[in-house]
Image (tube, coloured by chain):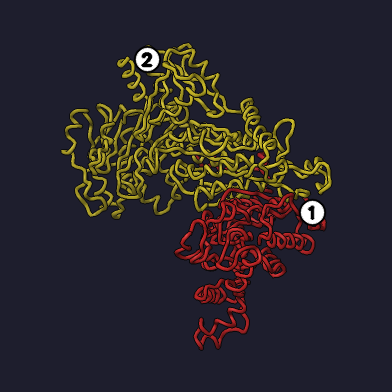
Amino acid sequence: MASIQIYGAGRAGDGTNTNVQMLTQALKDMGAWTFFWRDEVYSNIQTRDSGFGMRASDKQIFGPDDEFDILEAFDAGAYNDEAGEGRIPPITRVKQGGAVIYDSSPRLDYPNTSHEIKIEDFQDIIDAKQLRTFGLPMGQLAKEECDGRYIVRGTIALGAIAQMIGIDPERILKRYAKNFGDGSENYELNKKALEIGINHAKSEGWDLPDVRLDVTPIENDTRQLILGNYAVAIGAIAAGCRVYAGYPITPASEVLEYMAERINQFGGAMIQADSEMAAAHHVIGSALAGARSMTATSGPGFDLMQEAISAAGITETPMVIVLCMRGGPGTGLPTRQGQEELNEAIFGSHGDIARIVLAASHPEDCFYVMEHVFNLAERYQCPVFLLLDLMLAQSDYTVPELDPSGFVIDRGKLLTTEQFRERYGDNRIGNGTRYKRYEVTEDGISYRAVPGTPGVNNFYSNTNEHTEDGFLTEEEVVRQVQMDKRFMQRMELIRAEPQLPQARLYGDQSGKIGFISYGGTLGPIVEAIERLEAMGLKAKFMELRTMWPFPGQQVREFIDSCDTVYVPEYSAGAQLRGLIQREATGPSPKLQSLLRYDGRNMTPGWIVSRIEEAKVAN
Amino acid sequence: MPTEEITITPIKRSDITGESAWWCLGCGDFGVNSAVQQVIMSLVNEGGVPLENMFALSGIGCSSKEPDMLRVNAYQGQHGRSLPVAIGVAIANPGLKVLDFGGDGDTYAIGMEHFMHSIIRNVNITLIIMNNQVYGLTKGQASPTAHGGLRTISTPEGKKGRPVNPLRLAIAGGAAFVGRGVSWQRNELVDLILKAVNTNGFSLVDVFSPCVTYHREPGYRGSGPIFDWYRENYVVDIKDAWQTMRNEVFSPAEVAQLPEEYDPTSPEAALNGLRLIAEAGKLGREVTGLLLRDESQPSMAENLGVSADHAPVFCDIDINNNLEGYRELLAALR
């Protein structure tokens, strides 16, 4: 596999994000498989450092690589720890002999003038890494030739890069036409800026012959370039979600925004709730009324939802929550990577309730799993959580075309008007087969009726312990019967469910080095395995997709087949490792945690180096 | 659209009466329950609302036992959280008649966030509060509506600080209907709740429903006396307040312009109501009656583009019937 990686380092609000996205789109259109990630985004709208990464490859990729081939430096933050808080500037991640394209303009009257780049300030790194540097006066060119539209600095840099690494400018112009409208003012402005960059690189004779990707454009390219959160949102709509309720929170807001724009066109509604507490209860209400409904959130919001989750548990209400994890605790790292909510998803909320916790590792997963998420929620009348992490939720991946035509919608024991009448007749008092929401049935799951359906006039759902027909009770026999039904028996049924997503296996299965992980660690682990293989070490990876009920036996067998099992996760508390020990192995010397909790993404090299360190330590 | 029309079957009180009683002998909530059953019978038998379309909700507290006293489609939720569930129900199926029951602690303390936002959103539901100034189910602590000086187990020296005034908040938030009933005047309460249910938008019916066990006033202790205390010392009807207080509240020039009777539908009703609440408050009184009815604002469902005929629950979610639309969504992200 060959790949190139380019990084734009600027300041929030200066267009760096758009610039790197355009580069991603152009390379995708040239036939590459891409990954675009929001590497450095402070919880801040303007003025702090920001950095965006783009990786393009001749094979499908699921995460960033260790080092950059090219660094676009729009701002001194590319090499400086401006605030003096111990930030490690992105120039440290440029590879040996890599390239830096920087804004060489003198101080101008545009914003952020204090962050002017001075090459002498990082000459030591240039020398140490033997970097090739290209001073492009982007700011000055923007000011003098583009009506002072400082924001097109990125486009000028893009033109230069296109020229230097062989991107057909027509690919970029097509994207501008699509994004801004062909011939629009923005289109013309960016076209001009692009040409300025191309011509500057040409006249200077700049070239980076080593940064090339051998790909060819695909005719009728139907591959998606899609954000994890958008894949979730579209998957949910295709799975029949018609009420979305949510509260803005990073990194889940894109689901809400997408629903706000699109759900109404399919007859649904998006409720922007007054808190996550409210949002989760809106989901319960909509589900009681018979609509497929969901919310998406992150740690602090998920905390507020625990009460509603408990209510959904005892009322046996289908509830779907997409949990986009970030660095905690407290407000923690709102815009940084984390997987610290696994325990809360599995063990959170008071009382014992049946629940299903799934995990996705790339946008294809996010999309296709939604079919099962909603089916499982209705089939087992319980909360279902889908775990994403920030990197997956907020990164754009090139993935094969997503196709919902195979989705099967199974609403479990939800009764249609005809089915209700057949079972309960006119459902009047004195009638022997009167509807009971919590009826004890042979298969352990009660029928769900929808209020408003002809004949349904005693649907009673109760968060108090209740009798079969929903009335409050505290009697021990009824309590035990209901608890057994909705928890003990339900979890038994769920464990036997064939549609629970199965763990995926990667690598050489004869290997004695194992990895167990889930979610956004997929890319780095798979590539780390390839590198270990090149070092003569055979390794394999079990990617978990159903986190609860935990596939203990399968995990135990996998661990038994290994000498050492590494458990990479974004959690200081080693939550996944703890879960494995609780559910599969007990305390096991074979398990070794690879923990990253600095809020940054794992890369293949990070994993390999940790394993080497562990080996030395042993 | 629903798959078929529902035929209306007339109902008797016993058809919508639950299995058990949860309240103390003489509790005001019995009066509210009786009125609510009367309202449901009237809606079904005279208003042509199918019983299937009734949906009752509640939170936690003595008053929240109301769905247990009924036998209609219902959800009994957790403390303070019935309103956001009611919003979910009302948006997923705007064709349902949603009655939400709560207490003063349930709604004006732990549920205050949802109370204000439900009002501001103008969700088309009727909220009926059994307001008794105490937390009855946890044995008598002062609630947010407890008046200044009230001695309870949590305010042994008498309550200090101001009570929550839900009518004032509802008017300020822009509720479509703001009324207050009293549990001992059933016919008036039935009339008030019926009007509230038939109002498009958020309707608040706050009902003084005395706690006969934990609400004690000096010289008024027990079931009969506490009702007397309310009648003699606490309530003033908005119509009477209009007659007796308007000369204090309004300037002579304003009085000359005012109608004879208090008009809850006039454009000035919100301001007039607020001024009378404040004036009555100076005398230690709380107003009752219909303060405000204003249907000029769109409901939450209307703002979200859903309705009884175009309800999310009735969407066809069959894959094949939506495939083209789904593919368009995906084609836009390439």
Q: How crowded is mark 2: few (under 14 residues within 10 Å), some or many (20 or more)?
A: few
Outermost left residue: A120
Name the quadrant of the N terminus of chain A.
top left
Q: Which amino acid does label 1 sit on?
A: Asp
Chain corresponding to red in the figure = B
Q: Are marks 1 and 2 on the same chain?
A: no
Q: Which of A297 and A105 is in front in this view?
A: A297
What chain is tagged by disc 1? B
Q: Nearer the viewer, residue A443 or B334?
A: A443
Q: Which of A257 and B51 is in front in this view?
A: B51
- What percent of the width, then of the height, locates residue A342? 47, 33
Q: Residue B279 carries which label?
A: none
- Direction from residue A440 to residue A345 in the image, left or right: left
Vertical placement of A262 versus B200: above or below? Answer: above
Q: Nearer the viewer, residue B242 or B183?
A: B183
- Identify residue for label 1: B15
- Identify residue for label 2: A534
Vertical placement of A43 versus A589: above or below? Answer: below
Task: State the image quarter where residue B323 is shown.
Answer: top right
- What percent of the width, then of the height, locates residue A285? 62, 48
Q: State whether residue B152 appears in this view.
A: yes
Rendered residue at 59%/35% (across/down): A353
Disc 1 from disc 2: Cα separation: 77 Å
Vertical placement of B311 versus A309: above or below? Answer: below
- What percent of the width, then of the height, locates residue B203? 62, 64
Q: Chain A is drawn in which colour?
A: yellow
* Element on which disc 2 rests: helix
Rendered residue at 40%/54% (across/down): A185
Name the quadrant of the C terminus of chain A.
top left
